[in-house]
Amino acid sequence: MYTGGYTGKILRVNLTDKIAKEEELPFDVAKDFIGGAGFGIKYLFDELRAGTDPLGPENKLIFSTGPFCGTSVPCASRIAVTGKSPLTNAVGMALSGGYFPPEIKFAGYDVLIIEGKAEKPTYLWIKDGTVHFRNASTVWGMKTTDCQQVIKNELNDQNVRIACIGPAGENLSKIACIINEMRAAGRKGLGAVMGSKNLKAIAVRGTGSVAVTSEERLKIAKGNFGKAMKESPVLYSAFSKLGTPMVVDALCALGIFPAKNFSATGEFAPVEQIGVEAQNTRNVGREHCYGCPVGCSQLRLARTGPYAGILTEGPEFETMYSFGGETGVDNIDSIIAADRLADELGLDTISAGVAIGFAMELFEKGILSSADTGGLDLHFGNHEAMVTLLRLMAYREGIGGLLSDGVKAAAQKIGKGAERYAMHVKGLELPGYDVRGAKAHGLNYATSYTGADHNRGYAFQEIFGIPIPYAVDRFAVEGKGKLTKWNQDVRMATCDCPTMCAFLLDMAVPAIATQNTADLMEAATGLTYTPEEVQKVGERINNLARAFNVREGFTRADDTLPERLLTEPLKEGASKGNFISKDDLKQMLDEYYTARNWDLNTGSPTREKLKELGLEYVAD
Amino acid sequence: MYTGGYTGKILRVNLTDKIAKEEELPFDVAKDFIGGAGFGIKYLFDELRAGTDPLGPENKLIFSTGPFCGTSVPCASRIAVTGKSPLTNAVGMALSGGYFPPEIKFAGYDVLIIEGKAEKPTYLWIKDGTVHFRNASTVWGMKTTDCQQVIKNELNDQNVRIACIGPAGENLSKIACIINEMRAAGRKGLGAVMGSKNLKAIAVRGTGSVAVTSEERLKIAKGNFGKAMKESPVLYSAFSKLGTPMVVDALCALGIFPAKNFSATGEFAPVEQIGVEAQNTRNVGREHCYGCPVGCSQLRLARTGPYAGILTEGPEFETMYSFGGETGVDNIDSIIAADRLADELGLDTISAGVAIGFAMELFEKGILSSADTGGLDLHFGNHEAMVTLLRLMAYREGIGGLLSDGVKAAAQKIGKGAERYAMHVKGLELPGYDVRGAKAHGLNYATSYTGADHNRGYAFQEIFGIPIPYAVDRFAVEGKGKLTKWNQDVRMATCDCPTMCAFLLDMAVPAIATQNTADLMEAATGLTYTPEEVQKVGERINNLARAFNVREGFTRADDTLPERLLTEPLKEGASKGNFISKDDLKQMLDEYYTARNWDLNTGSPTREKLKELGLEYVAD
């Protein structure tokens, strides 16, 4: 049996029956899936039937920590939230950091599986192994920060850590997120899943600690890991001080900072208004996740106009893009305000921003009229309209009701050719990279089991020029299938499963990522892997997630990109003239499926591959 | 020497020199001034020179707890904040409840005296007797809720309790308050004093406890007290569920709910829109101060329009008035939103609302034009303009810069007869009672050492018809001088000094107030008083406060009311036809001064009276 790292316990909570029970975490699951997204996808596949309504009581919401969460391993105290996504109908998985994740371990659990639907608004109060189903009538309707504070007061314990939804999740917005502290498990509408269960919040307090198998071995492993972090040319020198939004400048320089719903990338590059230098004028401090020596999360305070005095933790790069370039807004204070408001309302900032940019382009093209928008002037760059739209989306008022389910659904309702301007893959709105100038990144969007998701296979080789596992030309097509498989499998195995911060992979340890995970796993849990076996865990889970989606009816045809990216070359900037043609995509997909040993026609994993990965039962 | 109740220690903090030192709390001070406002006024009088600039480093800010604060005595864990008011140039004293006050006792102190001025934005971190001067650059500029959370995170202790200022205090608005949790030491601009010292916050954590002299005696005293509370016809049955704003209905019925800057009292009585029934549609829960079984503080959530999802703790009655009747606004959600925003910005809700109502009347009268307001439509009832004005006041932008120092200063700058519409006494804006229908209440406004301050001598006899010490006719003039003396002295002695909740005096224990304080004092501190001696403490401190003001140049001429209340009878409602004529005021003042043994010409305490109260040194 394994020891250390894991608590060895799953807490299964049925909201319909108000029953909570503990189950043992099976050895095989721990060994073959490591933790985090691995556990989430494993249980989601095993326990959901095909065609489950994502907003019905049969969907599940799985909160799974990693084996180092709550230990002294830095940058590892994150949590994966997994459920069937109401936005994509595919696997929905999103991660968050902060202080909520380790508290679950301290309370005695590796995994929470939430089932059913509470009769009335409820929050869970998990205190060291006891579970209370509490009336959430006081906090229902509250924004996320207030909700957390009021629950702490109600429980008379300021040390409680809470994950909750805002009004958006309550109103079943399909782009609603889950917030803990000021951090988000942001994407794929998992906040709506929580809302559909009448579950406002999960409050946790644990006084236990997490043991490891060998403190001595762990010290050595952490030493190697820490050394790699220190040797990173950017981690402490830049990233710690600037956080993710430092990428705005880099992407503007590469000509791939998306602008105006991807219609003006390279033309609108507001680096002076919202780039690093402008960001620094709003920086007031930093926050750290539990056990993180980097502290990349910047506290920024808006300074001007109606936004003065609004604080946010962020905006992260993706939000700078979604509320900035994507919408044509270059007022940094409005972006700060929109970031905070989205967190308070519980809206995913990426999807919300893309929905706004989408509506703006439709307005400019005359597909949406002033009558449709309730008089809102939705020209690109109107930051006041942007902020207003967030509220309308969270409360499903007016045009907000249309956008609240994401651009794919909105485009279908609007008709009139709107789909052409809906920037999504499988229903998930595009993150902040115009992949016409970063083709592996584009292939990842097309193939990720979650839809257009930069985090499931981030092509740092193309974005930062890091030559690991090998150097690539970002405009090239050849080799990108294999690279994307590597990116997806390594990221799954070294970040999403051990719930380690993905920024480390990108910036500090890409060369030693699988070795690092193997070393830490042995020290913390006693489970031994070769680096190749670690990567194999990633492949296993990516196959299992793919199998889930195949079971839901997804095929090769769904592995695509928005028409615009496949047909319109970039008109300006350092990536001018580039796009991913349909032939490019076909070639990359063929290479990708071949590398994965997936069927070239259907995009389904072959029985042979599943068997190799110990997933025969999936093929059956 | 005394024992119990008190920690026996004063912490004196000099921000200029970054020095903190402990002093012994003298026996005589404890005995003669009890605590709270008594301590604050004692040290303010003794340590300030006449003519001290309220916003200069020579002003002091004194946080003083009471002898039951942090003990098991219910409703007693409040704190008085005292300084020379920048709004009135008189004694500024305001009280707050919540959890910050007892934390100071737990950390080992009865009183904090803050002196000097920090070179750079600073916050104090007081941990069990150790004092740290910390750089506040991260939290400077933040709203009050964010400020508190960020400091907790920075100190890595979620149990820290914090009092802080918002942007209004930083920008030296003379109507800025001090906020702890979501509670305010609201009035007289003490937030600006804190801001003038570059002191953003005081963070406190104490792990000690507060001993009492006799647990046995205390149990008996608390029993009697608790019995009186239970026997109250309103305390648990209504007040606990509705909080102070239940008074809206009562005052509308009495025809004294002030409306449209006191121009339309009795005509505009929005009881349906913002009275108890309407309030109940927004109630979601309650908060309790430390050790309070009542929990009158209502959590209310705005539901409609741009205000949806905004939570506030309140609005208390005074805020229902100031952002409601006073401004002609009857949109309850906008009042909730304005209440929260004022707390976040650190603006006193009463003064801010009266300043807005004042500006609205000037706008309607044509004294302020659209050019003066930067295009803001300031007609009575414009709730959006009201919310905007709060921000402009806190940041001193446009018309907000004018209003940010209160209506007296604004009227002087505007000229054109604006003073007639400036509803203040001694510079302090009027609370929510149109005293034309409650004359003792009016006399208290005229004579309170803090200016128009309902809390320094609340005439519950007139408002609630409680016949203690005797029944009165609210429209009568005779007897109101003596009554006001009683109200002021008893309130000082039984609420403001022992820092006990004033609502108890009004609603539960008026008949036994001084006996109750005597019993609790003996049990908790070992100091013995007769009920008459308790009341004498109140008289002593009211004389000392008056002496402070006399030293600053205040005379009988300052004991007055706004011209409108002295000349315009109420036109509608249950108090129709009533006003306080100049003769009425003269008669009441004569009776009041006589009852106090103060000089009838100057309004100064006589040497004889001061000597009787043990304040010879003051006369000298």
Image (cartoon, coloured by chain):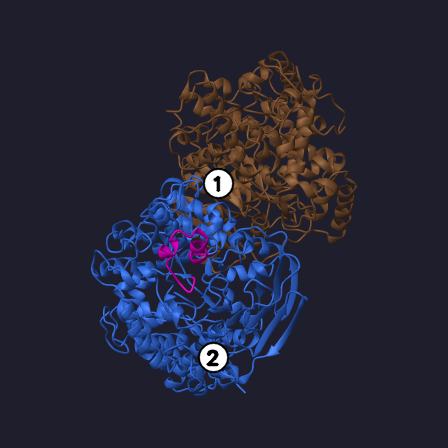
Chain colours: A brown, B blue
Look at the numbered disc 2 and give the secondary structure of its residue: loop
> Mark 2 and 1 residues: CB-CB less than 8 Å, in contact?
no
Foreground pick, B444 / A399:
B444
Q: Residues within 10 Å of mark 1 (few under 14, many from 20)?
A: many
Q: Position of residue B148 (x, y in %)?
A: 55, 56
Look at the numbered disc 1 and give the secondary structure of its residue: loop
Q: Residue furthest front?
A: B416
Q: Is residue B151 visible?
A: yes
Foreground pick, B410 / B231:
B410
Mark 2 vs mark 1: give the one in front.
2
Q: Is residue B463 above or below residue A133?
A: below
Q: Going 37% across and 53% down the picture, which residue do you hit? A: B417
Q: Residue B34, labelled with which disc?
A: 2
Q: Amino acid at mark 1?
A: Gly
Residue on which the image places disc 1: A346
Whether residue A451 sits left or right of residue B254 in the image: it is right
Picture quadrant of residue B200: bottom right
Q: Which residues are magenta?
A: B406-427
